[in-house]
Amino acid sequence: MRAIILAAGMGKRLGAYTRDGTKCMVQVNGKALVDHALEAIEAAGVRDVTIVVGYRKERLIGHIADRYPGLRIEYVANDVYDKTNNIYSLWLARERMADDDVLLLESDLIFEPSLLREVLADPSPNLAVVSRFESWMDGTVTLLDEDGSIVSVIDKDHFRWTDIGHYYKTVNIYKFSKDFSKRYYLPFLDAWLAAFGDNVYYEQVLKVLAFLEDIDLKGHRVKGSRWYEIDDPHDLRVAETIFSSAAEKLDLMNARYGGFWRFPAVRDYCYLVNPYFPTERLSHEIKSSFGDLLSHYPSGAAVQGQLAAKAFGTAESQIVVGNGAAELIDRLFRFLPGRVAGTIPAFNEYPARVGADRFVEIPTGGRDFAYGADNILAALDAGADAAVLVNPDNPSGRFMPEAEVLRLVAEAGRRGKRLVVDESFVDFADRDARFTLLDEAYLRDNPRLVVIKSVSKSYGVPGFRLGVLASGDLELVEKIRRDLPVWNVNSFGEFFLQVVDKYKADYRHACDLIAAERARFAALLADTGALDLYPSAANYLMCRLRNGVSARSLAERLLDEKRIIIKDLSGKRGFPEGQFVRLAVRDREDDDYFIKSFREVLGLAGAGTKGETA
């Protein structure tokens, strides 16, 4: 068995990273891609290696030098690397393919070393490593039959997004027997070069071979989390995250603040969205208008306000739409002077936007994180000019009932003080307890009140970045509106506001499902005996870990071993001694998977809870 690595390319899209070296010399977590590959080849028991070099070949050869005494490495030069493509580089190594079984790799890959051992152990003599297609992937894809045979190779020109559920992306790792190369691949390689030239991809030959009935070419399926192809700087950042240590991986993921769809199989228990909404019907309605929404400018802020007023029952003059609630929180505290009181621990956006010099901490009641309207009123009486109530509270999930909130609004108004109520999670409370302050008459009668709602969180559309702010103080609302860009909300967000009113019954049902699943998930967590849960009316649960379990260690292990990301609350202010985490409530399948994974990571009995295997 011989390994062939195609490493002649320039890697232009990596820019500065290939200025002084080749693409395969780019480092991932302190080690060059070519070193990752050669170490994996050596660990798989392959000793003969051919590397096709080209761009900056002297630097690459010098880098490898004598680092691998256990490997017999030879180099084949593609001196026209800038005028040819990988089909020509492979053709230059054709004699090696005719002399031995080969393991063919491209040099811009990083993968788990065990992958090569699996490929060599696979009884199929000829195979391509493939991974089910995901949205972040690019390049050649294949279709497999029930036996795993490759029946079609589809290039970019014939790719159809409507068919992605059937596609498998080529990982660009192949195993070919000597007989397969001599009888099939090499003759067709010569013919293709003669007919179409040398500036194409070698996968074109596989595309032709897949049509031959007597070809035995299998797809070796792997998960996308076990490999990554690096074409540009962002690919490099993603690869560094996937293949980092457990501690580094958690820090790198947290530093992204989302975008987890780029990471195959990661289940997000950190960010808070509604898993039961939008419905499939609403999603289809949005998709049906995709072309128009993509190619047209959205309306200005005034129209966005009209749509939001209709959706949430306010007057147009009372409400403003933001690019997420975070944008509105930022603008609000530019215009609210004085000191602002809020409970601690808190949703970070409030103390951050208010500023440490103006934010007045209202400590909550010890281990129970208890507080009520009187605690907030006391802070106002002590000199704060405004107060923030997040209800249900983030991160604890604590819920202040309607009667108490109404009393707080009235008392704050009588004192001439501002009250900001963030009801982003109130729709997830039990059905009989839900309420909203978004009401035209109520806002008009309580002009010192400001209400904020994250539509992204409540309605499960974080990608649209939608939030609303409403108040009976029309001057304040207008100041915020004028301070925002005219087009701060995109066409997709505008369309959502336009049509969501038709789906109110579906939305209420989705919130009922969240409330029921929260109760079920909480019972399963309590049954583990590994944590204390705090009552929650939101779509998340705050937990205190028992038995000396570290929140950081748990978060690292869940991400590294189970591809689950949770919120470690260790860095937040306002927590007493102990280790705390916040867990999002997802759907039944995901929550069962979490329970199973949680038990396995902590070595708890009952790790066989129903759910998908890791």
Image: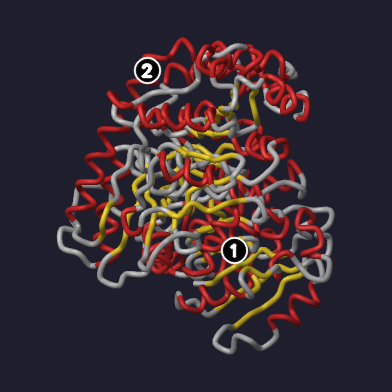
Query: Relative to 2, is 296 above or below?
Result: above
Q: Quadrant of residue 488?
A: top right
Name the spot of residue 258 as percent of width and height, x first.
56, 47
The residue indicated by pointer 1 is: 240
Q: Quadrant of the C terminus?
A: bottom left
Q: Quadrant of residue 32?
A: bottom right
Front: mark 1 or 2: 2
Query: Relative to 158, is 260 above or below?
Result: below
At 31% from the left edge and 54% from the top edge, which residue is drawn? 368
Name the spot of residue 579 as percent of width and height, x first.
37, 65
User: How far is the residue under mark 1 from the one under mark 2?
Assistant: 41 Å
Three-letter code, disc 1: Glu
The residue indicated by pointer 2 is: 506
Seen from the viewer's position, the closer of residues 12 and 551 is 551
Three-letter code, disc 2: Asp
- Label located before the other in sequence (1 or 2): 1
